[in-house]
Image (spheres, rainbow, N blue to C red):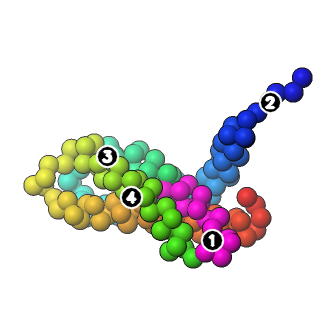
């Protein structure tokens, strides 16, 4: 007897399969290099080794978010308009990442410029979103999705 799977379960399985394929495109050394690049000016303010695991998690989430919205680029939409579609999700990711750095980095408000840290978080998340978008769009164009 065959097993009956709902449409919701089938979509979830398909999404997980696509995410696994996309994660093959992401390189851990590239993520660590981007962490060094983005948070170099905050060296000494918080320990990089403590926050590195969380930064990797947020980079992966941003990459997968960009890859998810790359489908619209394949159908002719520009990267900017696709980014506007997921603006709420990207903003939530940036805010969560900023909160993570503030709490786990054990940063006190007088130690560094909070605006600079927020802009660094924004740049970090958006750069991985763009990378996921371009690599996902390339996979769609090559029909590897």
Report which residue position mark 2 lands on.
4
The C terminus is located in which quarter?
bottom right
Q: Is the magenta stretch mostly helix, strand or loop?
A: helix
- Residue 9 visible in this rendered orientation of the protein: yes
Q: Does the residue at mark 4 contact the one at mark 1 (Cβ under 8 Å)?
A: no
Picture coordinates of residue 51, whole percent (x, y)? 34, 46
Instruction: State the mark number for residue 100.
Output: 3
Measure how far apart labels 3 and 2 are at the Cα level.
Answer: 41 Å
Picture coordinates of residue 23, whole percent (x, y)? 61, 52
Picture coordinates of residue 91, whole percent (x, y)? 39, 58
What is the total number of numbered labels drawn onto the structure image?
A: 4
Q: In the rendered image of this protein, does residue 47 appear above or below residue 4?
A: below
Task: Give the mark, 1 or 3, whose residue is nearer the N terminus.
Answer: 1
Give the residue displayed 39% in from the left and 62% down from the top. Answer: 124
Snapshot quadrant of residue 11: top right
Report which residue position mark 1 lands on.
73
Residue that sits furthest to the front in the current view? 7
Measure how far apart labels 1 and 2 are at the Cα level.
Answer: 34 Å
Question: Is residue 65 on the magenta stretch?
Answer: yes
Q: Does the residue at mark 4 contact the one at mark 3 (Cβ under 8 Å)?
A: no
Q: In the rendered image of this protein, does residue 15 appear above or below residue 63?
A: above
Q: Give the magenta range.
A: 62-77
């Amino acid at each position: 007897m065959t097993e009956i799977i709902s449409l919701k379960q089938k979509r979830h399985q398909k999404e997980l399969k696509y995410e696994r394929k996309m994660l093959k495109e992401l390189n851990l050394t590239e993520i660590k290099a981007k962490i060094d690049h983005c948070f170099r000016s905050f060296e000494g303010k918080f320990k990089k080794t403590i926050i590195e695991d969380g930064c990797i998690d947020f980079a992966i989430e941003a990459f997968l978010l960009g890859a998810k919205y790359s489908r619209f680029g394949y159908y002719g939409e520009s990267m900017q308009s696709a980014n506007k579609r997921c603006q709420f999700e990207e903003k939530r990711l940036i805010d969560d990442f900023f909160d993570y750095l503030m709490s786990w980095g054990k940063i006190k408000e007088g130690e560094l410029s909070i605006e600079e840290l927020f802009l660094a978080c924004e740049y970090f998340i958006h750069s991985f979103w763009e990378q996921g978008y371009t690599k996902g769009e390339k996979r769609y164009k090559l029909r590897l999705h």
